[in-house]
Amino acid sequence: MGGQQAYHMAAIYPDFVARIVVLASSARTSWHNFSFLEGPKAALVNSVDFYEGRYQTPAVRGTRAFLRVYSTWALCPAWYRERCWESLGFSSLEDYLKAEWDGGSDANDLLCMLQTWQKGDISLFGPEEDRGDLPKALGRIKAKVLLMPSRTDTYFPPEDNEEELKHLQHGQLKVIESIWGHLAGGGGGTKEDTEFIKIQVREFL
């Protein structure tokens, strides 16, 4: 959620922040994004080992269910169609999911991150009379802003950044053309994705 944090810093400290790069993120979590997050949340909190958050041993079944739901949305249909897990050295999709998505997370940590994500909204800060007005919040940002969504990101699609761009004083939009979905903007895409990001950020700074 680094992009949301960068947006918040620029909104809260307009005279301090000179430039921000927003990778695969948005100024406000969309309703579609919010609703998606309710899916993995439901899978976790309804698991037999979650015990309403008071588990004594890791809620492994719950976290596995959460991450399996999440993993599908992190990528896009083309990624699965082209069997991109094979480029990572996995012989099957199941091997990929087990290795990359099945373990290592605490259930309550995941829920805290999810709730922070759902509540992401820079319009909640600033003059009280303008709270909730996203265009005004974006318009108060003085920093130069580079928006870099992934073309196939189902969490933060380019259309969301295109709408934000209309209200920024100094904004640029550079779309990452990739089938690696949200992961393309988070270091999990291809070498070409990473190189494109590096070039654009270098030119921007």
Image (tube, rainbow, N blue to C red):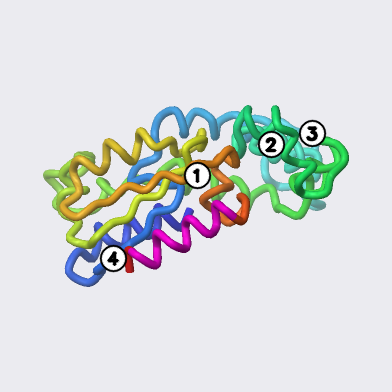
Residue designated by label 3: 48
Residue designated by label 4: 19
Look at 25% across and 46% down and name the residue there.
123
**Foreground mark, 4 or 1?**
4
Look at 72% across and 39% down and name the residue there.
84
Residue designated by label 1: 115
- Numbered disc 4: secondary structure: strand
Look at 32% across and 47% down and name the residue there.
173
Indicate the position of residue 135 as horizontal and vertical percent values.
19, 41
Residue 193 shown in magenta: yes
Residue designated by label 2: 44
- Callout 4 amino acid: Arg
Q: Residue 104 has which mark? A: none
Q: Quadrant of residue 59?
A: top right
Contact between labelled residues 2 and 1, with CB atoms less than 8 Å apart:
no
Contact between labelled residues 3 and 4, with CB atoms less than 8 Å apart:
no
What is the spatial separation of the Cα atoms under label 4 and label 1, in whole angstroms? 27 Å
What is the spatial separation of the Cα atoms under label 4 and label 3, in whole angstroms? 46 Å
